[in-house]
Amino acid sequence: MTQLSGHNFIGGERSAEGQTRWNSVNACTGEDLPFQFHEATEKEVNAAAEAAADAYPAFRALSSIRRAEFLDAIASELEELGDDFLDVVTSETALPRPRIVGERVRTASQLRLFATVLRRGDFYGARIDLALPDRQPLPRPDIRQYKIGVGPVAVFGASNFPLAFSTAGGDTAAALAAGCPVVFKAHRGHMATSEYVATAVIKAAEKTSMPKGVFNMIYGSSVGAQLVKHPAIQAVGFTGSLAGGRALCDMAAARPQPIPVFAEMSSINPVIILPAALASNGDKIAADLAASVAMGAGQFCTNPGMVLGMAGDDFTAFAKKLGQAICSQPSQTMLSSGGLKSYQGGLDRLQRHSGVTHLAGEPGVGNSANAQLFQADAALLLDNDALLQEEVFGPCTVMVEANGVPQLKALLHALRGQLTATLIAEAQDQPLLEALTPILETKVGRILVNGYPTGVEVCDAMVHGGPYPATSDARGTSVGTLSIERFLRPVCYQNYPESLLPDALKNSNPLKIIRLVNGELSDRPTH
Amino acid sequence: MTQLSGHNFIGGERSAEGQTRWNSVNACTGEDLPFQFHEATEKEVNAAAEAAADAYPAFRALSSIRRAEFLDAIASELEELGDDFLDVVTSETALPRPRIVGERVRTASQLRLFATVLRRGDFYGARIDLALPDRQPLPRPDIRQYKIGVGPVAVFGASNFPLAFSTAGGDTAAALAAGCPVVFKAHRGHMATSEYVATAVIKAAEKTSMPKGVFNMIYGSSVGAQLVKHPAIQAVGFTGSLAGGRALCDMAAARPQPIPVFAEMSSINPVIILPAALASNGDKIAADLAASVAMGAGQFCTNPGMVLGMAGDDFTAFAKKLGQAICSQPSQTMLSSGGLKSYQGGLDRLQRHSGVTHLAGEPGVGNSANAQLFQADAALLLDNDALLQEEVFGPCTVMVEANGVPQLKALLHALRGQLTATLIAEAQDQPLLEALTPILETKVGRILVNGYPTGVEVCDAMVHGGPYPATSDARGTSVGTLSIERFLRPVCYQNYPESLLPDALKNSNPLKIIRLVNGELSDRPTH
């Protein structure tokens, strides 16, 4: 069994200079677990940022193949963590063991997918415009461009995916793949889990001879703000609440040197059930949708928090079926007592609003949460009432009826930015599907047909992003290989000697990557 | 001759509801030209932003081929502007006629290059992960991604390139190429020029049947802040001063929905002359460098404002030669009396500083500026004195001696972010070139060897960007085709019916573009 020290990870060493300690908590019982974590002092936060800055020149100078080896090694180390690790994760998060086992597979696969991207080399975005010495009126010099990591990245993990969106999760993997050392702020909800994972990352770094400081982890509460303000930090990845994400964005924007923040924050993920699907398939949709709402106690960024449909007998009947399906979902323990309190607060706000009716769901007992179904007047959305736009983080969804296609369109237009929108449709719904698609394209990062948004595939084509407040920058994604782009910037070489060009830009194309050469994509050497 | 009305361009109409008017000014004489421009009222600014928002759905739905036709048509309309246009530009800017003629060629070529990008289709960033229905433990759905324009873009042109970085310049071309309608804030320094160009853009829009509101232009002073705060605006392109750019960034970050700002602001573009080059080629370097410093009265973003070298007889002799070459540059009229005043202010600050010596340059007479050469103590840079880091916008450069390679490296480390750095080197300088390159890569957007930074080629591989304060976001470029990326965001389609997918993502690949399919770049159909 791994011995947990509760010390910060700084520059390849462990450090515990501070007096403030935080206890890890059993999510089911609310009792302290036997692990204490030392909040990083101001000096330690600075040291972590500086360790990352010190590691940056050596780390970014490594070939991408070497960085791929590091990512693969992290995946292997994660897989080697034993039953004691799984016990700790389940204790800290109340997530069922099979879910943790599956999330570890996902996290390791994610790291290995980035390793594939590094070996493939298209992330370099290599572009070459060869010299045109005879061009009139002026010759064109030789100009070449590729992308390098922006520098040290601060990563803030999420509570709801203690592995896949945390210590060695997507943001960390993307930043390391880009050649950016990471300072990770451990989430207070799973500090022991984070120590296990950070230890695995450091082992992998040592085995693959990465520079010290390539990965650092700090514990604490106010340390996040200090980290984001540190001049060495060049970008921020965050998954969490709108309030938390926005606060980091504001801090980053107010720095002497503003830096980009990629915060994935708040989304209600509307599911729109089109009439033919509703008429022909209501029972199955109700069952599947209720399962998606209740999955993981609703603690998913892509949890479907709103169900839209056309008013009428079919939708009324559907509401009844969905209510039954919601009631048949088991009670679940949430990630933390804070999360449960926040969920109950969200339910209370819905309950108290005169435009909202509670349709189904038993009250939670003790520290467990039950799924809930509400119905809200369309006017609430149309009048821009903030209530319906705010994510209730838990197993809850709100039905909204439109009195026709124009109102349905108006409702979708009224929505704020979202991670996802889902259309449930049959063949006869195709004209409506076509009419709604352009509206949804401007509102979300991902549109699904006949699926549920709670599964987020890790692949090249995934977008886990979207317009504000889903994220702070709709041009990014925090899942999938495009997420590496957030931490890269282009550098251009003009008239540079071949021997000093990076391999990605050499005439001989030693990496055998596809490059844009004089406007054509090609893997051929340029001489 | 085109009749100038001085009215704002809003939604394809002309509008002049306000009472405040601004006169265009002859840059040589300081006298009013016979053109008056109506400052947009608050209502008109809102109308311009809303016209752009109204145009967005139709404009982004056009095929990229249709947008390419629009860009090509703008280029043609620009080329058809007559002598009266050239007269007006030279009057407003004091830039010599051949420069204006050349800048028009550059501006038209830039528009046509974006049309090429639209026809090539790689800007779509199309990615397809085909369904894996038999995958265990869960099937993979079909997932596809491409990029769409972010929405209406506000563009702020620069004074120093009244065509190439203004009304129909790089930011406008990139935004329109991305499918984003534009609201352009006319620069006060060339309002009549802007009216000519905007008229050409509108003609092109009409000829190619673009939606009304695809391009809008407003005049005035405080209208810029109002524009950036308008909820319809989704991104900002800016070229200008650090103070102006930072103010826009702060406004954009403080919006209820923060939006990205790509501000190209301040750069001193160090030129590092390595010892062997200095020893063997000092005369020619002095002549070429002086010409680069004085080009366009030094009013270039990439003007070389600092010259670094190793202390010693060679550098001392070089300083003398460079001083002579600087003195032999002709006096030039600057773009405006404000620009001249700002240049003189910059010179005064250098003159007054005890660590700075004036080496060469005659005082300017009347409204003309002369090139100036200074020398500053290395300590100024090393001690982080702000003076040397601030761009003096005009024909001025400051020499700084290093007492050895370690100090040269320390000087480069001390520099803030830059658009460019230039190394002048001979074969024997290669080891030093190699040692300095990694430092410069983290400081600049473009590194040149044996060239001068004042020429900025418009091509695929160019980066006209760099770390703060050169720009507000080092991940962007404002010249070259990569600049389109600033105004695009990814959208993902999961399990979408083929008939409703955008052409870029259809199985048949009707656009015949290269796509990343299951991790491999290919132009093959996926079925």
Image: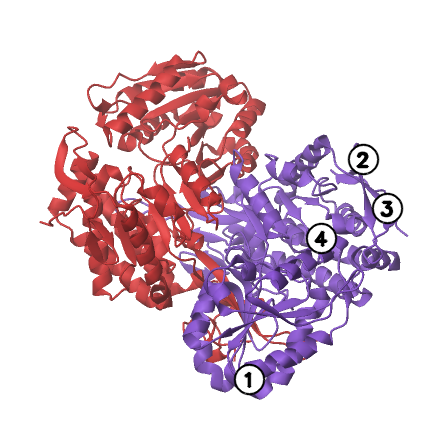
Chain colours: A purple, B red
The residue at the point 48 percent across, 27 percent down is B274
Whether residues under marks 4 and 1 lie with C-beta atoms below 8 angstroms apart, the answer is no
Q: CA distance from mark 4 to mark 3?
A: 20 Å
Whether residues under marks 4 and 3 lie with C-beta atoms below 8 angstroms apart, the answer is no
Chain holding disc 2? A
Relative vertical location of residue A11 with respect to residue B123 in this rendering, above or below:
above
| Crowdedness near tag 1: few (<14), some (14–19) or many (≥20) residues, C-alpha within 10 Å | some
Q: Considering only order in the chain, which callout, 3 or 4, is on the residue closer to the N terminus?
A: 3
Whether residues under marks 1 and 3 lie with C-beta atoms below 8 angstroms apart, the answer is no
Q: Comparing marks 1 and 3, which lies closer to the viewer?
A: 1
Q: Amino acid at mark 1?
A: Asp
Chain holding disc 3? A
Q: Quadrant of the rendered structure where residue B223 is?
A: top left
Task: Confirm whether circles 4 and 2 share one chain.
Answer: yes
Marker disc for residue A16? 2
Please give left or right for residue A278 compared with residue A71 in the image. left
Task: Confirm whether circles 4 and 3 share one chain.
Answer: yes
Q: Comparing marks 2 and 3, which lies closer to the viewer?
A: 3
Q: Comparing marks 4 and 1, which lies closer to the viewer?
A: 1
Chain holding disc 1? A
Q: In this figure, which residue is indicated by the disc labeled 3?
A: A35
Whether residues under marks 2 and 3 lie with C-beta atoms below 8 angstroms apart, the answer is no
Q: Amino acid at mark 3?
A: Phe
Q: Secondary structure at mark 1?
A: helix
Q: In this figure, which residue is indicated by the disc labeled 4?
A: A168
